[in-house]
Image (tube, grey):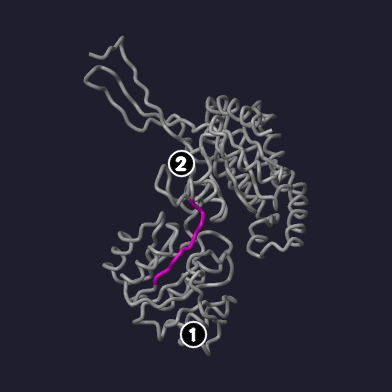
């Protein structure tokens, strides 16, 4: 089955690579319209997925990721329309010039080919990946989690309907509907057809892909994100940022998971933090220095476990640790961070500069929420993933990250001397 999917996707990618921007936008607009027109069908499928997942004991964080509402589906359709408005990178000349040999050389952006994406209970990923791949002239093979197979199937059916009605191959966007995990291992070996693989899931999935894939893998999306509150930070603005970073949508990978507080302000800051976290129903997991300062305060507090520093909560839980200084904070982030998103709250320019220069994450913030690490927020349109590695893309992956380039040499009967 996968062999044929791969062949069909590769054949479709050749056709997609030749489309003009107008042709690509036409199919994207139709996809957005159909997502709204056929919302009831998609939402019914999603309701069945959510009900089964809840019965199976899926966590509230994962249920939130899985759930589609009319408003969320409308937002997904609007994201597709936003992709239409983005500049098409395909065909862009990156650089070039005339060589001494007389050869005119340029680097031109071209599609990658076929993109494989493995993800869990995130039905919005289906549309995000499809829209970005189509805009860049790529084909896509999608493998969502077993929790969301009905939603994915209904969504891909809509996308394929739009493709066919626009005279394009339905195989440009395909989904592996079977929950058989053996198919994941098979997909990892399809380097003959798939040009890049993007896993979006937990650490186990990323480890599997790194170790078993014969296809280039983009890893990322695991966000053990930190915020450092240094001793010059103003309490009220800092608390406002922390609340946003923790509670706006706790199940996302750019949510803060560990708060580092400078010892110089811990006595005054931590009780204020507890009051704010209690109002947001956040449970605090405190280290040995912060625990005494948080006891007898409004928010629920427990002692942090060593392993808590290395995992995503993806829920209303927050680690709290008192640090001696900036060096102590940076050392903690280097040991426990995932190079996703980290922030410093400070009024000291020197500390801000040091943090930016010394924290090696794909996104680093000064006096801002980690929740901004998002393709839409960065002006990239819908993102296909957040890469925490350094090659070939880093941070939110928009359109350019789904392209490569080719060298083009134009001569006048030119030969090498």
Question: What is the secondary structure assignment of the residue under circle 1?
Answer: helix
| Position of the N terminus by quadrant | top right
Queried whether the magenta region covers residue 223, the answer comes back as: yes
Check disc 2 and report the residue beneath it: 401
38 lies left or right of 331: right
Foreground of the two, 321 or 349: 321
Q: Is residue 239 visible?
A: yes
The relative height of residue 272 versus residue 222 in the rendered view (above or below) is below
Graded by Cα atoms within 10 Å as few (under 14), some (14 to 19) or many (20 or more), the crowding at tag 2 reads many
Foreground of the two, 79 or 232: 232
The relative height of residue 125 versus residue 58 in the rendered view (above or below) is above
Q: Which residues are magenta?
A: 220-228
Report the residue at 43% width, 44% height from top. 393
Q: Quadrant of residue 63?
A: bottom right
Tell how many labels: 2
Queried whether the magenta region covers residue 121, the answer comes back as: no
Graded by Cα atoms within 10 Å as few (under 14), some (14 to 19) or many (20 or more), the crowding at tag 1 reads many
Report the residue at 59% width, 25% height from top. 11
- Which x, y percent locates residue 124? 63, 50
C-alpha separation, residue under disc 1 versus residue under disc 2:
44 Å
83 lies left or right of 391: right
The relative height of residue 24 versus residue 260 in the rendered view (above or below) is above
The relative height of residue 346 versus residue 265 in the rendered view (above or below) is above
Q: Are marks 1 and 2 in contact (CB under 8 Å)?
A: no
Foreground of the two, 286 or 110: 286
299 lies left or right of 347: right
Query: Who comes first in sequence, dot 1 or dot 2?
Result: 1
- Which x, y percent locates residue 200? 56, 50
Report the residue at 39% width, 62% height from top. 365
| Position of the C terminus by quadrant | top left
Check disc 1 and report the residue beneath it: 294
- Which x, y percent locates residue 112? 49, 33
């Amino acid at each position: 089955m996968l062999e044929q999917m791969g062949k069909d996707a590769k054949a479709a990618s050749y056709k997609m690579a030749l489309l003009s921007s107008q042709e690509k936008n036409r199919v994207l607009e139709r996809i957005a319209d159909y997502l709204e027109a056929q919302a009831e069908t998609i939402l019914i499928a999603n309701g069945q997925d959510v009900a089964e997942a809840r019965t199976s004991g899926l966590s509230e964080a994962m249920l939130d990721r899985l759930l589609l509402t009319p408003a969320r589906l409308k937002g997904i359709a609007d994201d597709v329309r936003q992709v239409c408005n983005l500049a098409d990178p395909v065909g862009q000349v990156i650089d070039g010039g005339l060589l001494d040999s007389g050869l005119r050389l340029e680097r031109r952006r071209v599609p990658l080919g076929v993109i494989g994406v493995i993800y869990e209970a995130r039905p919005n990923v289906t549309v995000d990946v499809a829209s970005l791949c189509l805009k860049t002239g790529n084909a896509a093979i999608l493998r969502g989690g077993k929790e969301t197979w009905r939603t994915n199937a209904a969504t891909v059916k809509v996308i394929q309907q739009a493709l066919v009605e626009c005279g394009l191959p339905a195989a440009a966007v395909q989904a592996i509907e079977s929950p058989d995990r053996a198919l994941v291992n098979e997909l990892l070996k399809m380097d003959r057809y798939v040009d890049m693989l993007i896993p979006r899931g937990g650490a186990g999935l990323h480890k599997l892909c790194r170790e078993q894939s014969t296809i280039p893998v983009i890893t990322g999306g695991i966000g053990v994100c930190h915020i450092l509150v240094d001793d010059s930070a103003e309490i009220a603005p800092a608390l406002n940022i922390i609340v946003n970073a923790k509670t706006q949508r706790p199940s996302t990978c750019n949510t803060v998971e560990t708060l580092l507080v400078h010892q110089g302000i811990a006595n005054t800051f931590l009780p204020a933090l507890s009051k704010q976290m209690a109002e947001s129903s956040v449970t605090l997991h405190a280290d040995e220095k912060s625990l005494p300062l948080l006891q007898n305060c409004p928010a629920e507090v427990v002692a942090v476990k060593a392993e808590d520093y290395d995992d995503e909560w993806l829920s209303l839980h927050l680690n709290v640790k008192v640090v001696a200084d900036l060096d102590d904070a940076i050392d903690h982030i280097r040991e426990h961070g995932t190079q996703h998103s980290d922030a410093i709250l400070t009024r000291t320019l020197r500390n801000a500069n040091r943090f930016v220069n010394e924290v090696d994450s794909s996104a680093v913030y000064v006096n801002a929420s980690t929740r901004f690490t998002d393709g839409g927020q960065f002006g990239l349109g819908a993102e296909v993933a957040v890469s925490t590695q350094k090659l070939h893309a880093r941070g939110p992956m928009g359109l350019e990250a789904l392209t490569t380039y080719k060298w083009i040499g134009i001569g006048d009967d030119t030969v090498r001397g």
